[in-house]
Amino acid sequence: MIELKGASKTYGKTKVLSDISFRVDPGEFVCITGPSGAGKSTLLHLLTGAEDITKGKIEVDGVDLRLIPPIALQMFRRKLGIVFQDYKLLSNRTVSENIAFPLEVCGAPDDHIEKRVRKVLELVDLTKHAHTLPNALSGGEKARTAIGRAIVHDPMIILADEPTGNVDPDQSVNIMKLFQQIHDSGTTIIIATHDSGLVDALKPRVIQLVDGEIVRDSIGKYSRKESIETMKTAKTTTTAKRKVKVTGIAS
Ligand SMILES: Nc1ncnc2c1ncn2[C@@H]1O[C@H](COP(=O)(O)OP(=O)(O)OP(=O)(O)O)[C@@H](O)[C@H]1O
Ligand SMILES: [Mg+2]
């Protein structure tokens, strides 16, 4: 349902993602991990169609994102629920107005919006903050508002960028449980995260990026040790290749 084939992204001369290929089936739970600057957010931007790939192919629910016209892209985005790394909450709207926003954009009837927002507020445990503005919320409450806004229109796919980036470990557990609940209802979830606690608790499919390349694609824990070893292997292979080249030149 999501398929990337040899996808690369460059900004000017800087290669940010190189030859990325993977497939995500409906209902999967995937965490994209990797150090800062590895290309996690860029990869999510490609999946939303916010950025074009430089090379390769990217298909989401049968739609080739390189070929889709702008009007169709807007319709396509309704299949997605997006949690941005900086949440992008509307500062002059309350929690319930933020959550209602995607339904208003879709032109949903008022009574449907009211019922659905009430249900989502309960799910993200923000009923008591329904009328609070974002600047009066804690980090975890902001994150849950952003998640509420992402799920309100019942999207096929949730793309979340560091949803636990600004919260304490207890809040992180709550957010993780929330994603688990959303996943249990059949939604495909892709989360970019540094949060080893979240990954270890969920043991999802982990796609690990290092310097814009996939160095791991397997189910399990964040496994710092395994990650470091994988990175070392990747580095050693690169160094070995370089050594062969140097030796070749010397001899
Ligand atoms: N619009 C842009 N123009 C130029 N370079 C960019 C642009 N967007 C991202 N980059 C570069 O691409 C690389 C990957 O950035 P990205 O934001 O995808 O990393 P990340 O893995 O999400 O990092 P973090 O964990 O810090 O959020 C970085 O080196 C960044 O400077
Ligand atoms: Mg990022």
Image: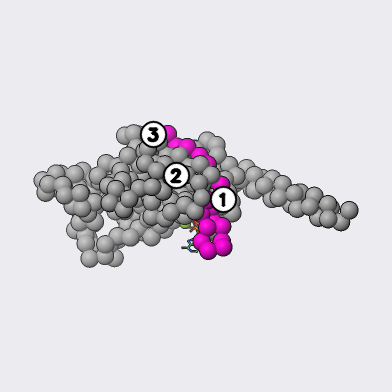
Determine which residue is flagged by label 2: 58
Name which residue type carries label 1.
Ser
Observer-side mark, 3 or 2, equals: 2
In the rendered image, the vertical position of residue 172 relative to residue 87, given as above or below: above
Majority secondary structure of magenta residues: strand
Q: Could you tell me residue 173's position as x and y percent?
A: 41, 46
Question: Residue at left 20%, top 56%?
Answer: 97
The tag earlier along the polypeptide, 2 or 1, is: 1
* Side of 100 relative to 167 (left or right): left
Examine the structure image and report whether residue 17 is included in the region drawn in magenta: yes
| Residue holding disc 1 | 18
Horizontal and vertical percent position of residue 52 = 43, 54
Q: Nearer the viewer, residue 44 or 222?
A: 44
Rounded to the nearest angstrom, the CA distance separating label 1 from label 3 is 25 Å
Which one is nearer the viewer's eye here, 125 or 10? 10
Image quadrant holding the N terminus, namely top left
Structural crowding at the residue carrying mark 2, measured as other residues with C-alpha within 10 Å and reported as few (<14), some (14–19) or many (≥20) = many
- Residue at disc 1, secondary structure: strand
Q: CA distance from mark 2 to mark 1?
A: 13 Å
Reply above or below: 222 against 39: above
State how far apart marks 3 and 2 are (Cα). 16 Å
From this viewpoint, is residue 62 visible?
yes
Which residue is tagged 3?
Answer: 26
The range drawn in magenta is 8-25
What is the x, y in percent for residue 12?
Answer: 53, 63
Q: Amino acid at mark 2?
A: Ile
Q: Secondary structure at mark 3?
A: loop
